[in-house]
Image (spheres, rainbow, N blue to C red):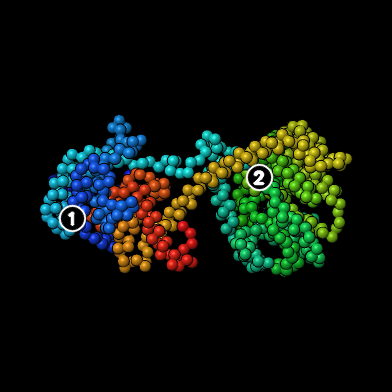
Amino acid sequence: MIMRPLTYTPTIGGRRLPNLLQRHRPRHPEVFVPKSAATIAAVAAAASSPGSPTTSRPSTSHGTTVEDPFLQQDTSWQDYSEGDTSYGQYSYHPSEGSQVDGISQRLDDVRLLLFYAVLRRANEGPQYYDDSYASHHYDEAAAYFATAPAPVFIRQPLHYHLYTPTTTPDFVPSTTNTHFVPPSSDLRQLLQQRSETTRGIALPGLNLPEELQGYHTLVPLEITGAGAERRKFGNWYTTVYRAIKASDGLPYILRRIENYRLLNPAAFASVDFWSNLKHPSIVGMKEAFSTRAFDDYSLVVVYAYHPNAETLHDVHLKQTNPPPGTSSTTSASTFSPRSRFHSPAATQYNQQQTGLLIGQQPPIPERTMWSYIVQIASAIKKVHEAGHALRSLDANKILLTSQNRIRLSLCGTMDILMHDTPQDMHMLQQDDLTQFGRLIFALCCGVPGASSGPHFQKSIDHLLRFYGQEMKSLALWLISKTNVKSIDSVLDSIRYRVLQEQEDALSGMDRLEHELQGELENARLVRLMTKFGFINERPEFAREPRWSETGDRYIVKLFRDYVFHQVDEHGNPVLDMSHVLSCLNKLDAGTDERIMLVARDEQSCLVVSYKDVRTCIEGAFNDLAKAAMNSPAAYKHR
Ligand SMILES: Nc1ncnc2c1ncn2[C@@H]1O[C@H](COP(=O)(O)OP(=O)(O)OP(=O)(O)O)[C@@H](O)[C@H]1O
């Protein structure tokens, strides 16, 4: 689509000139500096010889010197007359049909406009030039218009080559749903939802502390108050809040253990270990403190926040899943759209469940199940190797934070709570593995207590039927009390699954890198827009139009109009994002494609390439930067 920034509708010799470009009346009249007759003659000569080389063009400040806008507009005539053939690959072919007809029409339009511009200049002669000059140029222009070959002026289409080259989509398909990374469009939506959730605020009237230990804006992430179903963690009730840390402005999770009176600061001895432990499948701990801000003695453990995370219990084990939004908590905006991670099979299975193992399909696909197992095993390995134990491995305390990505959410809290009860570490680690086995049973069968009770045999049959011998053996081995187990043995036995996990993780990384590459363009465009903002309409030059109406700044100003202030034939604003993005990308790439910029008073136009405009922006920005050097505090970064 060709954008037409100005429309002229006068007629010459009964022929109506084209509605080429339209522009509102200028708010500020341009200041013109008359040019010398010698220069005009040179420009006219250039305009009259269509094949004349670019070097005959008067100099501009972007590679040449121009003192005023008129001079620049003159160069445009010659630009059009050059019949540039350097656009070989985009050149006009008559056989191209209707689209080409349109282009041809536009070429005619351009030629007519140029003719008219020459004519107008000639007619305006007395204001700036003598009559002989005007009549001379009338003839020149008429002759030119009659004989000049159609200039090749074809809009260079915006293609991917204007962006940073990336891997071909064939190798990194962005539309397929990979194990860890959903298709691009879903990923974008997911990230936007997270961003929205992160900014959600609590409903008023919750009587939450305004501030505690440097955290503010608390938002509860689970249902509290009368009627809420609550489970105890050990002997305590816990509540999870999101809060903003004042010192860095970032959101964190505050897990509050209610009515826990901490008497011995030695309880925090393990906080150092847990806050230094980094593992992709463990929610990082930041710090812990006791507080009376909730009008009781509470212990608060601070963790990393993963927006819209859900527990594996909520996703896979809940018997019936309330529709999104109805699981409302004290703050509706804080609950995540849980349907995102639901496997339809799981929902169907759960809905069929009545506590018995009668499902017709596995609640969790086998690949996902193995993925969970590998991630949990890897987290256990990290903790056991460091001489610690998880002490809690429950579907309620494992978060699904993105597609098939899980994280253990409560690591370290039990160490604080049970600091005064000495325990044998080996036993605790054995217990971790037993809990791991129970968790596998629960998730595979879709029932929390599947590894015990009267349904145990049915659970084993179910595991065998839907997940095979390997899964059944692993789960049974983990829950058995007779073996001395180790996480290394577990990892040995599932090494094929570990490899598959690594493959999927690396592919996911490639996908995300590819996505990130696309976002690089945003930074480029923001940078350009920032420069525009610095250069255009500077108030300190408001009374000095020569700053903005001459040289580089004038081109930048006209280009800004061309990009952002397009109007249609009726004078209505054209708000075309793709035009803006296309222009800015071409500008950033500095292409040789040329565009016609028209003054606001419609009295002049000039043809420049994106490369020229880019040079002008750099020039104008450098002028400002030099001035800003006098005030180093104000000049930070280009
Ligand atoms: N690190 C975290 N980042 C984001 N959200 C979290 C985080 N930890 C917990 N949550 C959210 O807080 C909610 C409550 O967490 P909690 O661990 O108490 O789970 P729960 O399902 O309420 O378990 P229980 O019923 O045993 O208390 C979870 O459903 C989850 O959505």
Residue 314: where, in percent of width, then height?
Answer: 68, 48
Identify the disc placed on residue 198: none
Taking the spot 64% from the left edge, 68% from the top edge, the residue there is 210
Residue 418 horizontal side relative to residue 132, left or right: right
Number of callouts in the render? 2
Judging from the image, what secondary structure is the residue with disc 2 in? strand
CA–CA distance between discs 2 and 1?
A: 74 Å
Is residue 507 positioned above or below 224 on the image? above
Q: Is residue 16 in sight in this rendering?
A: no
Residue 530 horizontal side relative to residue 80, left or right: right
Taking the spot 72% from the left edge, 55% from the top edge, the residue there is 276
Q: Which residue, given by chain and number where applicable, does mark 2 sit on? A: 405
Taking the spot 44% from the left edge, 41% from the top edge, the residue there is 160
Residue 573: where, in percent of width, then height?
Answer: 34, 53
**Badge 2 density bin: few <14, some 14–19, many ≥20, Cα 10 Å:** some
Residue in the foreground of this view, choosing between 249 and 310: 249
Residue 91 horizontal side relative to residue 166, left or right: left
Q: Is residue 188 in sight in this rendering?
A: yes
Residue in the foreground of this view, choosing between 471 and 272: 272
Residue at disc 1, CB closer than 8 Å to ligand 1: no
Quick one: which residue is furthest to the top in this view?
Answer: 95
Residue 321: where, in percent of width, then height?
Answer: 66, 46
Judging from the image, what secondary structure is the residue with disc 1 in? helix
Residue type at mark 1 is: Ala
Taking the spot 35% from the left edge, 35% from the top edge, the residue there is 89
Q: Which residue, given by chain and number where applicable, does mark 1 sit on? A: 37
